[in-house]
Amino acid sequence: MNSPSESTHGSEGKKAQIRAIRFAHPGNLMARYFSEDYFNSLDESKRARMWQIIKTGIENPDSQMGAYAQSSGDYEDFEPLLEPMIRDYHNIPRDQEIEQKHDWSATTSNCNLEDIDPVLNGVSMRVRVGRNLAAFPLPGAMTKAHRLEFEVLMIKAFTALQGDSQFGGTYFSLTPGSSHVIDADAYQRRVAAHQMFKDMGGDPYLVSAGISSDWPFGRGMYVSSSEDFIVWVGEEDHLRIMSMRQGGDLAALFGRLHDGLEKFAKLIPPFAHSSRYGYVTSCPTNLGTAMRASLHLPLPKLTEGGSHLERATKAALDFGLSVRGAGGEHSDAGQGGLVDISPRARLGVTETEIMQCLYKGTAALWSLEKTS
Ligand code: ADP
Ligand code: MG
């Protein structure tokens, strides 16, 4: 435990670091909106909580957001800091209410990438939602015992799902000694197939936030026998629930996720959700729908053969899309300029609007690629 003078000294050092980051890394939203007056107004216990939330953005100055919530109450308790960051990222003006509505109606519409170009009928499509249970701390603040208890609860639900004709499958655990444990080679094959998440210890943003602590305890994945419905346990959120397929039928992909999500949610305790921020997630970028719908799209011209993401990133922004490397966040473009594109906004938009944004944005980006 620090003495008051030590902790005051520590605070002054961190404030100075944040001032330096604000100058050198203007994209770091935590540094942009951190207010010393607000921090000074907090009591000791809230100050300690705040440092935990923004530790990642101080230790990783190149962070885009620079904060990970540690408990679902953080969004209300630290609103003066987090709300402006959330508005900035999700592009919600100050005079507009933040409100999250859900609408999955587009899953019954006709939305096929092959109508943009027949060659897009074989792209890799993925849509995931993040979910956290209200009954547990968010992953950054979980103890090892919480992580193990959470996994046991999920295994019960997966066992109940096992016999389902549409979503039946297998759970693979990374927890040493688990009766569901997967060996290292099989795990690596699942990672290479983009089905399973990477060793979280390799992600400095997650390490600083405590989200990767106790790796690999309490981590694992469920995959349906059809291999297109997947649930991650113990990554950046308690759960990442997704559908992944090769093809072009976006509506069918969304429909598959929606059906699986409804079925699975009935088997587990309630998710953390607020009318204002929607589904509560570790990272403020994921609030709302907590949905990221992505395509692995080859953009050889816009990425100059895969060597640079800058031009594609800039062009995609105009269509509301973000660009990542094909290996996931913080990776480079893959062979042939393969990139991961996904609608940037997740809060204040519905699930249907995200699907439509992906479709329209892909059409626009694809036409730019072809005429470049
Ligand atoms: P998220 O945060 O949405 O889970 P990440 O960027 O962390 O996404 O990537 C997680 C994994 O999902 C990576 O292996 C990435 O390559 C894979 N992935 C993302 N989108 C697709 C896609 N459309 N097709 C195949 N794999 C994908
Ligand atoms: Mg991720």
Image (cartoon, rainbow, N blue to C red):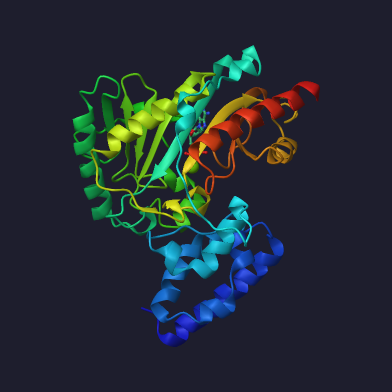
Q: Quadrant of the N terminus?
A: bottom left
Near-viewer residue (352 or 227): 352
Q: Quadrant of the C terminus?
A: top right
User: Is residue 143 found left or right of 242 in the rendered image?
Assistant: left
* Residue 100 image offset from top left, x and y in percent: 48, 50
The relative height of residue 282 versus residue 325 in the rendered view (above or below) is: below
Identified at 54% across, 19% down, the residue is 248
Residue visible at 43% across and 31% down? 191
User: Compared with residue 295, is residue 70 higher up or lower down, i.e. above or below?
Assistant: below
Residue 214 appears in the figure: yes
Residue 120 can be seen, yes or no = no
Place of residue 279 in the rendered image (x, y in percent of width and height, measured from the top left):
41, 49
**Residue 351: image x %, image y %?**
49, 38
Q: Position of residue 133 (x, y in %)?
A: 31, 50
Q: Say above or below: 350 vs 160.
A: below
Q: Is residue 61 above or below residue 115?
A: below
Q: Residue at x 60, y 15 (%)?
A: 114
